[in-house]
Amino acid sequence: MFLERYTKNGFSIWIDTCSILHDQFQTCMNNIAGFLSENNYKIKITQTVLNELTKHTSSSDEELKANAIKALELITQSNLKNIFEVYGDSSHSFADNDFLVLFTRLRLNENILFITQDVALASDVWALGDSRSVRSKRVEVAKITKNGLFGEFEIDDDFDEDNEDDEDSINENYAVDFDGKTIGDINARVRGNIKGDYENDINEILDGNIMGDMYGDINGKMNGTIQGSMYGDINGILNGNILGDMNGDIYGKLNGKVLGKMTGTIHIPNTMNNEVVQENIVMHGVQMDNIPTPDEIKQRVRIAFENALRNLQ
């Protein structure tokens, strides 16, 4: 069996959200459940992966929603639940970051096998085990195959295959609705809605709404509403509301409200006295409409300064 070479060498086994949502996930788990139980081995799932799955159960994408509900039931309620072990807490919002930080630490003392379908993340994790500056244990990457088995992740071949999807990026202007799963980055102007969740970046202009969650960055301009939560950064301009939570940083401009909670950082440039002073305001559980704008902050500073001068006279 594929896993035997790893369990014999004491590898810890971890799995990513995208592999759990793979259509062969349950088949794969059924295939390996007996082996794992006989060898008292478990697959580790981080709490942030469970958080992502839970978020997906409220997705407007019905297929994603159904897959997430099915996966959570399998992990927590089915007769397979004993082959999984939950690791960590919910202090982070995006699982990819957690894996890289976690494996950077764990690789010093233990061998790691990571299961993912994400080529870019697989490449980053693979590189941790190939570091020349740090003495590391072995870090290996595998994936769920279309036959419901674990298979080796050949980084070079899989990366070349995945890069073919770059052709799906929007490089010409369109006036049509898109399915968020079928397009890459928006590098032109799109006048239409993105149905469901969107996991790529807006580098030019989107005149429309994102019907689910936004996992990429807004580097250009979006004139519309994000109807779920946002897990990326706003480096450009968002002219619209975020109806869920904001779990990224704002370096650009948000002309709207976060109707959930803001757990990122707002970077406000202050150009008083011709010097640029960058202030970071970190908020947890604060709604955006309670936050003063940069102009309001300048007004308050000016009033305070004038009052201070009067008191000195």
Image: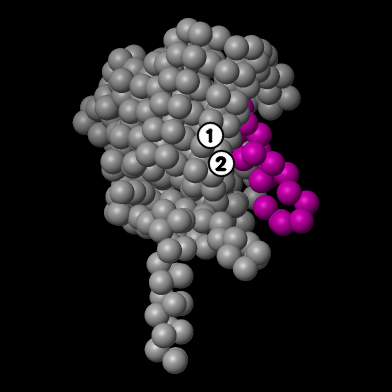
Q: Residue at x 64, y 39 (%)?
A: 124
Residue furthest right in the image: 132
Pointers 1 and 2 in contact (C-beta within 8 Å) = yes
The one nearer the camera, 263 or 84, is: 263
Asked whether residue 297 appears in the rendered view, the answer is yes
Give the secondary structure at mark 1: loop
Q: CA distance from mark 1 to mark 2?
A: 6 Å
Reading the image, the residue beneath label 1 is 218
User: For this view, does 257 lie left or right of residue 145?
Assistant: left
Give the secondary structure at mark 2: loop
Q: Residue at x 65, y 65 (%)?
A: 275
Q: Residues within 10 Å of mark 2 (few under 14, many from 20)?
A: some
User: For this view, does 287 lie left or right of residue 173?
Assistant: left
**Residue 292: image location, x then y, percent:** 37, 56
**Residue 97: image location, x then y, percent:** 52, 45
Query: Any magenta on residue 272?
Result: no
User: For this view, does 130 lie left or right of residue 201?
Assistant: right
Seen in the picture, residue 285 relative to 149 is either above or below; the reply is below
Magenta segment, which residues? 118-136
Seen in the picture, residue 282 relative to 287 is either above or below; the reply is below
Q: Residues within 10 Å of mark 1 (few under 14, many from 20)?
A: many
User: For this view, does 1 lie left or right of residue 43?
Assistant: right
Instruction: Pick whichever of labels 1 and 2 is earlier in the sequence.
Output: 1
Quadrant of the frame with the C terminus: bottom left
The one nearer the camera, 135 or 123, is: 123
* Tag shown at residue 163: none
* Amino acid type at mark 2: Asn
**Residue 207: image location, x then y, percent:** 47, 20
Q: Residue at x 62, y 68 (%)?
A: 273
* Tag shown at residue 235: 2
Corner quadrant of residue 310: bottom left
